Image (spheres, rainbow, N blue to C red):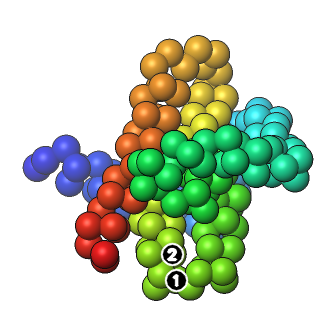
Amino acid sequence: MGIASRDRSHSRDRLLSQSSLYEAFVEGAKEGFPTAVQILPHIVGMMVAVTVFSESGAFDLFVTAVRPLLDKLGVPAEIVPMAFLRPISGTGSLAFMLDIFRTHGPDSLLGRIASVLQGSSDTTLYVLTVYFGSVGIQKARYAVKVGLLADLAAAIFSVMVVKWLFK
């Protein structure tokens, strides 16, 4: 019997031996509550930072500053705020994607790039904040750099692949 098979068998036996599935769920939720309380300040901090950055007009200033470079590289400027926000906030980047859909349409080149970017990258800083915060890791070492580099690669390849496939 393999390890995975043995683990499933053990889990099934344990589940069946529980007096109540609901009670087991409640007990697990109680055990997880301290972790949720521990990571909540990190989540709130990330949400506040994203909101301040968005509402302050910093995205517009940033896009204006890098537009000449984007034009030379063939990267649509409308994608930049979404690509910048994606590692921080999935909901925030989704809002930018929906705005691109409303303005340009989901089947437009920009809509397709936004869709591929949304699906091929992750909320790196959020994930690292939650995971590392929940277990008390203070120094992320290379995790942040590697995660953000992967997000940058996802943004670049999203533009390249969609342009190659749909132009």
- Callout 2 amino acid: Gly
Q: Is residue 20 visible?
A: no
Query: Foreground residue, 116 or 31?
Result: 116
Q: Residue furthest left?
A: 1
Mark 1 or 2 closer to N-term? 1
| Residue 118 to residue 111: above or below | above
* Quadrant in the picture for residue 82: bottom right
Mark 2: which secondary structure?
helix
Across and down, in percent, residue 167 comes to 31, 75
> In this orientation, which residue lies closer to the viewer: 96 or 10?
96
Q: Residue at x 67, y 48 (%)?
A: 63
Callout 1 environment at 10 Å: few (<14), some (14 to 19), or many (20+)?
some
In percent of width and height, residue 41 lies at: 82, 35
Q: Which residue is mark 1?
A: 106
Q: Is 155 placed left or right of 52 in the picture?
A: left
Above or below for 47 versus 138: below
Asked if labels 2 and 1 touch by Cβ distance under 8 angstroms, the answer is yes
Q: Residues within 10 Å of mark 2 (few under 14, many from 20)?
A: many
- Quickly name the residue at label 2: 111
Instruction: Say which residue appears at 43% left-offset and 34% top-offset.
Output: 149
Residue 153 rendering spot, x and y as whole percentages:
38, 43
